[in-house]
Image (spheres, grey):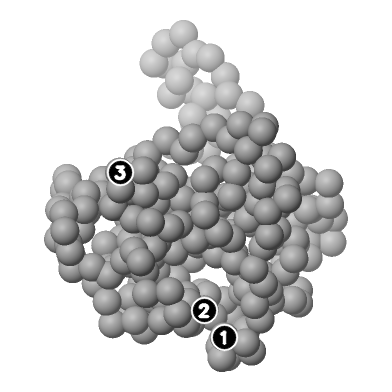
Amino acid sequence: MSSILVGIKRVIDYSVRVRVKPDGSGVVTDGVKMSINPFDEIALEEALRIKERGLAQEVIAVGIGPVDIQPQLRSALAMGADRALLVQVDGPAPVQPLTAARVFLKLAHRHQPMLVILGKQAIDDDNGQTGQMLAALWDRPQATYTSKLELDGGRARATREIDTGLETLEVDLPAVITTDLRLNEPRYIKLPDIMKAKKRPLDTLSLAELGVEAAAPGPRVVKLTAPAVRSRGIMVKSVDELVGALKQRGVI
């Protein structure tokens, strides 16, 4: 059966203003709206569109982390995913990209997907590494930062935005795709679908059940500080007034 694996990560909603804790040990998450990472939502939308065109039979949403990620997996089900799988990893330390890549490798061996579609990066850590690591471990082609995706038989054609314009790659399937912002516009989730998703089962696995060894801890965050407050701008009426204001601030 042709299936598509899609990665789902839980992050602070992109519309929320992130606040640093008073002691600088992290960001405030208590009472803060959490959502699917926007790039992962785009990945899921693309997988659903491929299925709706009759090119895949099943879309499996995969979340890696603590049980807190369950609402985001249920949102994936509400969008249209056929199954949701939680690979439970407890503990305060974030899941390292290499650990996530090893998980997707094991799941790829189990489910034999035609595609693994991941967001190009997460908006919390901006690592952008999991897709590339998975392709290397799986020994399969990859097309990263994809802004357009077309499937033709056993091949995928991916368009990527690069510094000099657009680049088109053709890769054999199965392959790893990471999604850029312009690939699509995710669909709106309807309330009835949200209610139905709350009753659907979630499959849960552990790293040990998959035979995955967690990667060594990554960089340790010593302290977080909020960006400096920007000074208020002023309006000038002439070039001379602009030059004078810049000199006063020591810019020139």
Q: Residues within 10 Å of mark 3 (few under 14, many from 20)?
A: few
Sequence order check, earlier mark of 2 and 1 = 2
Q: Which of marks 1 and 3 is nearer the N terminus?
A: 3
Residue 168: % across, % down: 15, 53
- At label 3, the amino acid type is Arg
**Mark earlier in primary sequence (3, 2):** 3
Residue 249: x and y in percent read 56, 34
Callout 2: 10 Å neighbours few (<14), some, many (20+)?
Answer: many
Q: Is mark 1 on a helix, strand or loop?
A: helix
Q: Circles 1 and 3: CB distance less than 8 Å?
A: no
The image quadrant where one finds the N terminus is: bottom left
Instruction: Say what secondary structure mark 2 lies in.
Output: helix
Viewer-nearest residue: 169 or 217: 169
* Real-space Cα separation, disc 2 to disc 1, in angstroms: 7 Å
Question: Label 1: few (<14), some or many (≥20) within 10 Å?
Answer: some
Q: Residue at x 42, y 47 (%)?
A: 48
Amino acid marked by disc 1:
Leu
Q: How many marks?
A: 3
Residue 120, can we see it? no
Question: Is 3 above or below relative to 17?
Answer: below
Q: In the displayed structure, would residue 37 be above or below residue 61? A: above
Q: Which residue is drawn at 42% across and 35% down?
A: 185
Give the labeled residue for mark 2: 103
- Tag 3 secondary structure: loop
Q: In this view, does 175 lie above or below 179?
A: below
Label 2 sits on what residue type?
Val
Q: Going 52% across and 54% down the picture, which residue do you hit?
A: 82
